[in-house]
Image: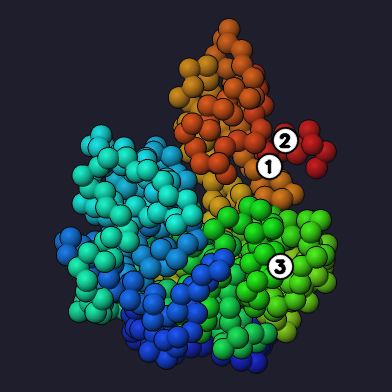
Amino acid sequence: MKERIWQKHYDPQVPISFTYPNIPLKELFRRNVMDYPDKPYVIINDIQLSYSTVNMMVNGLANYLLSTGVKKGDRVALMMPNIPQYVVGFHACLAIGAILVPTNFQYTRHELQHTFRDSTPKVAIVLAAFSGNVIDLHESGDYKFEKILTVQLQNMPMEVKSCSAAMDFTEAIQSLGDFSEPDAEVLPEDLAILQYTGGTTGVSKGCCLSNANVLAMALQTTTAISANCPLNDIKTLAAIPLYHIYGENTNLNVCLISGGSMILVPDPTNPLNILEAVKKHKPTVWASVPAMIIGINNHPETPNYDIGSIKVIIGGSSPIAVEAIRKFEELSGGIIIEGYGLSESSNVLTVNTLNKRKIGTVGIPMPDVDIRLVDLETGTKDMPLGEPGELIAKAPQIMSGYWQNQEETDNAIRDGWLYTGDIATMDEDGFVTIVDRKKDMIICSGFNVYPRDIDEVLYTHPKVLETCCIGVPDEKRGESPKAYVVLKPGETGTAEEFIAFCKEKLTGYKIPKYIEFINELPRTQVGKPDRKALKELDSKKAGR
């Protein structure tokens, strides 16, 4: 890559380019087990599991999966909150070359069916309390698993529906009594993760991320953090879900490189859970979203907690208000660095440096990341500095493509460049500001919500003639879904009625926060519902 204007702004410890180890991810974990066998790796509440203890569980699960016929390249779905069993499942799959399919454990049966039919996992590892939909899919024949491993929480045991494919997770680990390291060849180029996202267009697709992609991302991210937090001091606060690419990279990946410890917060929706974890375990690195930062800033109990251990706060998902940044930095003494990325790039493409921040921007490209801003019409003409264009990127962490979807792969990756669908500007120092999105994606508290998913659910309501969903500003979540609904002639309805209908078919963060009834939808010249016009209508009504 030629010299770029942003490279002069890297922190001193950050090189212009890395030499990436030509090894699979499991080798990084194995090295940590050998170097830090007694060091706490996973911490949750009063439980601390050392690297050697986690490794024993990983080997037991990996050998069990092999015994059931899971082999290199087969898919395994992980459906859990941030609990130690997720970490064990993650490393067990990497150990044998199985491809992880991180899945939101709160998905409805409707949402799960698409992911499973597309990725075809042989095994699902699911929190017992949320195993009903998975077992129902299996028993109905809508999707068949080889095994469904159910994870029980010690303080909250749950009865699991009867199913011939179901087995207790802990029993599976112990069933063979074999805790030796599996003999499975895994190469850097082998796929490690299918991370599902809406991509630049259409329905949810699996981003094919190899061991090499994830390792490159891990090394870049950890090095960026290390200016304000040396590697041997890294202790991450895992409040972002590990099944989300953001949570995976900033916790699991960072610990793979640093040999650090990871503090798990299963339910971060209550700020007190975060405050208690910080007070008890003193994390030094926290990947967060605006809603979490605002929640801590405004919680009445925050002044009673010492959060000064946090040295680096990574901000993502949506812009953080300047006032919120300043207040949290005053409370913690740490520094917030905002960045930008997507599932297709294993998480991060740009980040603010610790030595030079421009609040309101998403920073500069990481080492080995090349970025261009191109015209929106053809995607081939480079835009001048300060002028908006579609952000396209080349980097070692960028996916090889979408799982079994060549058409969408060809649309997203052209001549080696990933077309992100995001519109941005770049200043004279190379700092990037995201100004809009070509795609219609809504980002709620860091989660991608695709309006089409909500539209399709509302269209199944017998009273709906037409509908179109948009994202509207939300101070805490970044954005929230709002659905415009045209009722069939003679029908009446209430917003509460349609919100309740969506609750039966959609995960919580996808449920429209607002329903507005409208006589007809604005349309584009080709007759499609015009989301841009609806956003303008909403902004005008709200006085924005």
Q: Quadrant of residue 383?
A: bottom right
The alpha-carbon separation of the residues under discs 1 and 2 comes to 8 Å
The alpha-carbon separation of the residues under discs 3 and 1 comes to 21 Å
Which residue corresponds to the image point at 22% horizontal and 71% vertical from the top-left? 177
**Secondary structure at numbered mark 3:** loop
Q: Amino acid at mark 1?
A: Val
Say whether marks 1 and 2 touch (CB < 8 Å). Answer: yes
Q: Position of residue 72 (x, y in %)?
A: 22, 68
Q: How many marks?
A: 3
Q: Position of residue 71 (x, y in %)?
A: 20, 66
In front here: 171 or 340? 171
Q: Position of residue 58 (x, y in %)?
A: 33, 72
Say whether marks 3 and 1 touch (CB < 8 Å). Answer: no
Label 1 crowding class (10 Å Cα cut-off): few <14, some 14-19, many 20+?
many
Residue on which the image places disc 3: 361
Q: Which mark is residue 538?
A: 2
Q: How is the image coloured?
A: rainbow
Which numbered disc flags the more N-terminal residue, 3 or 1? 3
Which residue corresponds to the image point at 70% horizontal and 78% vertical from the top-left? 309
- For the C terminus, the image quarter is top right
The alpha-carbon separation of the residues under discs 2 and 3 comes to 26 Å
For residue 406, side relative to residue 312 (left or right): left
**Secondary structure at numbered mark 2:** helix
Residue found at the far top of this picture: 490
Q: In the rendered view, would you say 83 is above or below 27? A: above
Q: Amino acid at mark 2?
A: Asp
In front here: 8 or 496? 496
Which residue corresponds to the image point at 83% horizontal and 72% vertical from the top-left? 330
Q: Quadrant of residue 196?
A: bottom left
Residue on which the image places disc 1: 472
